[in-house]
Amino acid sequence: MAVNRPFRYFDFVMVAFVTVLVCSNLIGPAKIAQLETPWLGSLHPALATLEFGAGVLFFPISYVFGDILTEVYGYARSRRVIWSGFVALAFASIMAWVIVILPPAPYWHNQAAYEIAFGSTWRIALASLVAFLCGEFVNSIVLAKMKVWTAGRWLWTRTIGSTIFGEGVDSLLFYPFAFYASGIIPDDKLLPIMLAQYITKVGVEVLFTPITYKIVRWLKREEREDYYDRNTDFNPFTLKT
């Protein structure tokens, strides 16, 4: 069990995590982007053009912060942050829905655009919440257990390894639940988009590895904390630390 004591930077990391999470779910999902990637097309024709939700550009950063939280402060504290993010995301989704359904003033002619940008259906909103919660907990648990197994060595193996599992669960839950047979994304495009998103998310984690190393080392030194989850209760449905 973690020992409760004050930390100088824990709150800042938590706020950064929640901010990135909410922004990625409110700003990114409304737009499907497309990039020409002929260098990947040489590997497989289906990869010559990548189509992806724009939120993929910064949603993986929330996983970077999740890794930092678990690595430095332990799973129990990270669990509280994950639930904080879930509540913030749920509140933002509900308020977006409320604002969209409010009757617009007669002289305000942007309702249609507003509905496209912020009017996620209940199906997409619920899929996002469930996928986030499951993916983040898988990410945190895998990292915490790998830290014990590796005796704290090879940080890159657990930041990338946990993301492979966490983002995998997130993608497998979100895309089929949110978009299959929905008419928003053609069913034949769903798998390529899901794979492109997944590869990009893991790729962002890999690219951020040097930065993650620097932040983790700095935080461990400043906070005088390097928690190992040897006797931790991994039940996700408790807030005990």
Image (cartoon, rainbow, N blue to C red):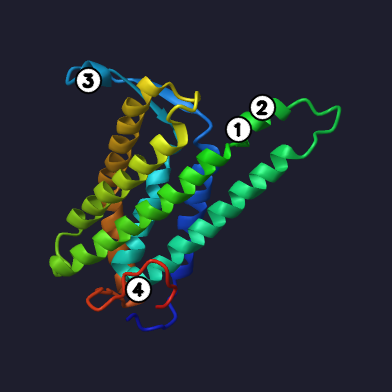
* Front position among marks 2 and 4: 2
Indicate the position of residue 184 as horizontal and vertical percent values. 50, 25
Label 4 neighbour load within 10 Å: few <14, some 14-19, many 20+: few
Q: Is residue 186 above or below residue 86?
A: above
- Using residue 193 as the reference point, say whether residue 25 is left or right of it: right
Q: CA distance from mark 1 to mark 2?
A: 6 Å
Tell me the amino acid under the disc marked 3.
Trp
- Asked if disc 3 and disc 1 are in contact, CB closer than 8 Å, the reply is no
- Asked if disc 1 and disc 2 are in contact, CB closer than 8 Å, the reply is yes
* Front position among marks 4 and 3: 3
Tell me the amino acid under the disc marked 1.
Ala
Q: CA distance from mark 2 to mark 4?
A: 46 Å
**Res. 56 in view:** no
Tell me the amino acid under the disc marked 4.
Glu
Q: Residue at x 71, y 42 (%)?
A: 99
Which numbered dot is residue 34?
none
From the image, tell me which residue sits under label 2.
113
Tell me the amino acid under the disc marked 2.
Ala
Q: CA distance from mark 4 to mark 3?
A: 43 Å
From the image, tell me which residue sits under label 4.
222
For the C terminus, the image quarter is bottom left
Q: Residue at x 51, y 29 (%)?
A: 31
SS of the residue at dot 3? helix
Label 1 neighbour load within 10 Å: few <14, some 14-19, many 20+: some
From the image, tell me which residue sits under label 3.
39
Q: Nearer the viewer, residue 24 or 207?
A: 24
Q: CA distance from mark 3 to mark 1?
A: 32 Å
Indicate the position of residue 63 as horizontal and vertical percent values. 36, 52
**Lower position in the chain sequence, tag 4 or tag 1:** 1
